[in-house]
Image: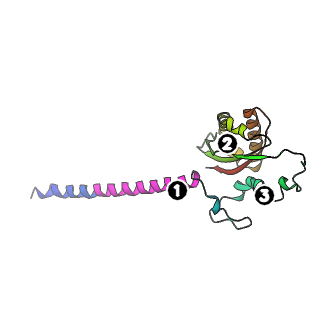
Amino acid sequence: MADAAPEAPEGKKKKSGLIKYIILVVLLLVLGGGGYFAYLTFFAAKPAATAPAEGAAPAEGAPKAEEKHEAKPEEKKAEGGHGEAKGGHGGGGKDKAPSNNVALPPFVVNLADPNARRYLKVVLEVEMTGNPELLEGNQAKIRDALLMLLSSKTSQELSTLEGKILLRKEIVDRLNQAIGQPKVSRVYFTDFVIQ
């Protein structure tokens, strides 16, 4: 009879150990799935074919128009819209040198928020009036200048339209300083996410 009593707690230990392993496996699956979702959402390149047509209603869960608003003038120019390329009401520069657009790789930086750990992911396209190879030849200077500028901003500064417009001007100034010539005329945000 004395031998039967120690066996019962041992059976409970085996069951509780099994439950711990099941819970651990479920947690790992949930965390792995969340990590994969975050990778797809923030870091994986999105195919251009899935972009909604202009004038179509945005899909559920799509970024707000405010976040993508800055890319629209460039898209209109590229598609032959009413921008500067056609000499429409936004143009005015008849003797202007032809512009070249250069896409820069994405920037992901921690923001300077004192009370929270937030980051910014931004993808830029640069409009140049000169040779676009100037940007390619100065990649290290450009990345350094933009990383320093972007990481000095707070989410409060970048959340408003005025903050984004000011950031555009500062980026143009930093790019021109980095290449040593005033060849960058505009910068377009093609992706702008604060998390």
Considering depth in this image, is 39 or 49 the residue closer to the camera? 49
Which structural element holds mark 1? helix
The residue range painted magenta reads: 16-42
- From this viewpoint, which residue is outermost toward the top? 180
Instruction: Decide: few, some or many residues near mark 2? Use Cα within 10 Å; few <14, some 14-19, many ≥20.
Output: many
Type of the residue with mark 3: Lys
Picture disc at residue 153: none
Q: Amino acid at mark 2?
A: Thr
Residue 11 at x, y = what percent? Answer: 21, 58
Return the residue at label 3.
76
Taking the image as drawn, is residue 55 in sight?
A: yes
The residue under the point 57% across, 50% down is: 43
Badge 1 is on which residue?
37
- Circle nearer the viewer, 2 or 3: 3
Q: Is residue 24 left or right of residue 85?
A: left
Q: Given this view, does label 2 or label 1 mark the residue nearer the observer?
A: 1
Residue 152 shows in this picture: no
Quarter of the rendering containing residue 157: top right
Type of amino acid at the residue the image marks with label 1: Phe
SS majority, magenta: helix
Where, quadrant-wise, is the N terminus in this rendering? bottom left
Q: CA distance from mark 2 to mark 1?
A: 26 Å
The span from disc 3 to disc 1 (Cα, nearest Å) is 32 Å
Q: Which mark is residue 154?
A: 2
